[in-house]
Image: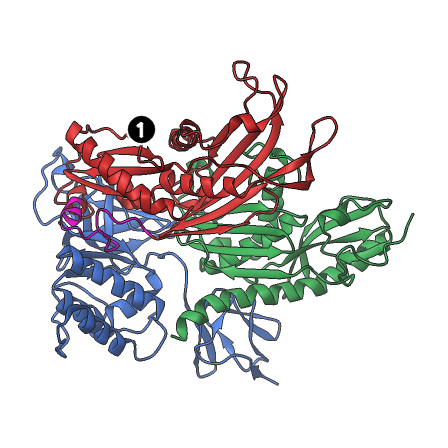
Amino acid sequence: MNNDSGKPNSKEHLRKALAADVRFDDRKKTDFRDVKIEFDVSNTADGSAKITCGNTEILVGVSLTVGRPFPDRADEGALMVSCELLPVAHRKIESGPPSINAIEISRVIDRSIRESGAIDVKALCIVPGEKVWIVNVDVIPINHDGNIIDIGALGAIAAIQKTLFPTLDEDNVANYKEKTGKVVEVLHKPVPVTVCKIGDQLFIDPSRLEEEQLDARLTITVMEDDSICSLQKGESSGLTIDEVAVALDLAVKTAKDLRKNI
Amino acid sequence: MSELLIKEKEVVVPGQILATGMEYLPSHGTYRKDDNILANRIGVAVLDGKVIRTIPLGGRYYPKRNDIIIGKVSDILSMGWRVEFNSAYNGLIPIKDGTFEFIPRGSDLARYYDVGDYFVGKITNVSGQMLIDVSVKGPGLYKLRNGRIVEANTNKVPRIIGKKGSMVSMLKQATDCKITVGQNGLIWISGEPAMENLVVKTIRKIEKESHTSGLTDRVKKFLEKETGKTIEERAPEQFEEPTSEDGEQNE
Amino acid sequence: MSKYTKRYDGRAMDETRPIEAKAGVLKNADGSGYFKIGNTIAYAAVHGPREVFPRFLSNPKKGLLRINYNMMAFSGPGERNRPGPNRRAKEIGLVSTKAIETVVDLEKYPNSAIDVYIELPQTDAGSRCAGICAASIALADAGIIMKDLIPAVAVGLVGDTAVVDLSYKEEQPEGMEAVDIPMAIVPSTGELTLLQMDGITSKEKIVEVLEMAKKACVKIAEIQRKALQEKYQGEHNE
């Protein structure tokens, strides 16, 4: 527990603002910052999007590569999500191999998309047992003001929907100079919503300042029919079952609105 | 033949030729190259007779002796407290400058200032190697409690304070918040959540429009609109806390 | 060898591709820049001056300028690249640092680091030059004391023809050889601070293209200056 109450910038001060439902940017606890998506921000990627949410700005690039399928899924393509937290995005981020933070973000976004069956992996098969399409999604924040998981995932779905297959030559080698007109089909639009807790206050879409003081967070991925396809709890404090129930409600409501953006 | 190539208050960038000929003289933010005077940082051009200088628009805080700053304790050492204050350099509060209380030998210094504590301090010395001494012992210097700290552009601090503290005084009156502005761009705000947010919003507005005229009036109208209060013209405050006397940039 | 008489995209031999430049695009950074030339896009963010890590690199006499160059995994022309620094990126970071170091007054920043991060989401040749252009804008935006902005552009030869700002297609022309010379210049002194070459040619040709490059760089510096002025003047005209 943080014994910093009484100091400026304390967690207690944040909690008071949340309790008054007046966050530092005047948002309510249930307000998600406005989302703006721009497509075709990288013509070297097979599909790309830039998603802006408040001051968080993320570039997402999708690259389709030809690879071997997993041995137990011989006729299925694969999804690989990679999130890089780079120094360009915030002064506190250091250079180096992906931090555990970045790895968690990658894997949570990955599971949200995978578990929902959003991508038809059988449609990615080229030669069963030998060659399949791999959908590589690179999520790269260029300005980090919190909530990379939710915003990155929205950007990923947006970018995947606009991803064009390269052509294949006779040896099934990808030719990136010529695109087919075919887009990667997205069957579902899963939306992760991370519900956060500071003290006794639950809220969504944390800014970076809020994120640095979280007691707990729960990322809940919601499908179009309101079913939940993925959960991830983070940070060190606990959540009661009641809190989880409230969080699930909040996530379902929020996901509906967010999905309109993609 | 000397020629001035820029206007007063024009934004100039590094390498930009401001004047030709030997008639003009370079000062802060400018340098002479052959017969020309060029800018060496992004700033607003100012002409003082034949002397050309620029008011910086960007850049992190550069510590100066006698500056009043808001800082944070980052470490506790045997001879005092190491402090950070939003600069490339950190500083030290020697034990003797920590407090008027007597500190017995071997006592736990964290009792007085703990890691993470914020304070209003004064820079007492800046050595050649940028070793910086800070004091928290003196009128208007103290440990800060509650509230929050925001970062503003150090170059805009004079505008945020205003002439004889007039701008920050308006802010306090309108929002009922306690506000202390450090020369290093860190600002302490304490009050109701919505009002704290209004202070921050107003500070951002002042930063953005810092070199326009009529700013004080516009801020007054903005605050009156946001709070529904009428702001009275008050006599400049008798300093509860140290502020810069002059609203214009001093160098 | 065939002759290159008309450029693939119809440009004049001494014409750069269309350029778009902006300052202050990344809010978290102390200064930032965006530079797009043709289909090559570079972002640059400055963090600093700040404490030097690792500490042993700290110099009590002057500051440390460190420029990092990184191409995003999806920014190359063909297949996706494995993210992370490779040797090419590290070398580009080094020459970029040297290209700009000359004009930065590092003695004003003892015991500090000025770190610049260049990120490219899309490239079509000329990426290191675009990075240097973006980095210059970012450093000026950050209020760093520097004698001048640094424009950079790649010039060279396609076949025997001298050209400015080679596109990817021109770097590997069909049926011809190409020479690629990335360079950067200090506009106020005419000094070259970046000079590299890939290809084989005569010394006369080198001097010829460098003169062309100098002219192009004067125009690029104007664009960099406008980007900075637009950001700040725009605020002042409210």
Task: Report the residue that reaches farthest toward the left.
Answer: B101
Q: Is residue C193 or residue A235 the one in the foreground?
A: A235
Q: Is residue B119 or residue B63 the one in the foreground?
A: B119
Q: Secondary structure at mark 1?
A: strand
Report x, y in % for residue C137. Answer: 53, 58
Please give the range of residues in magenta.
A15-33
The residue sitting at 53% across, 55% down in the picture is C34
Q: Total number of numbered labels?
A: 1
Task: Report the residue that reaches farthest toward the bottom.
Answer: B1
- What colour scheme does the image use? by chain
Q: Is residue C162 or residue B63 the one in the foreground?
A: C162
In the image, the chain rendered in blue is B
Report x, y in % for residue A92. Answer: 37, 42
The residue sitting at 56% across, 51% down in the picture is C42
> Magenta stretch containing residue A31, yes or no?
yes
Q: Above or below — where is B207 with respect to A258? A: below
Report x, y in % for residue B79. Answer: 22, 39
Tell me: A15 left or right of B203.
left
Q: Which image quadrant is residue C149 in?
A: bottom right
Tell me: A237 left or right of B251.
left
Q: Is residue A190 or residue A84 the one in the foreground?
A: A190
Q: Is residue A226 visible?
A: yes
Tell me: A91 left or right of C228.
left
Which quadrant does the N terminus of chain B fall into? bottom right
Report x, y in % for residue A48. Answer: 53, 44
Tell me the shade of chain C: green
Tell me the shade of chain A: red
Assign the magenta stretch its main secondary structure: loop
Label 1 sits on what residue type? Leu
In the picture of the structure, the residue carrying the numbered disc 1 is A231
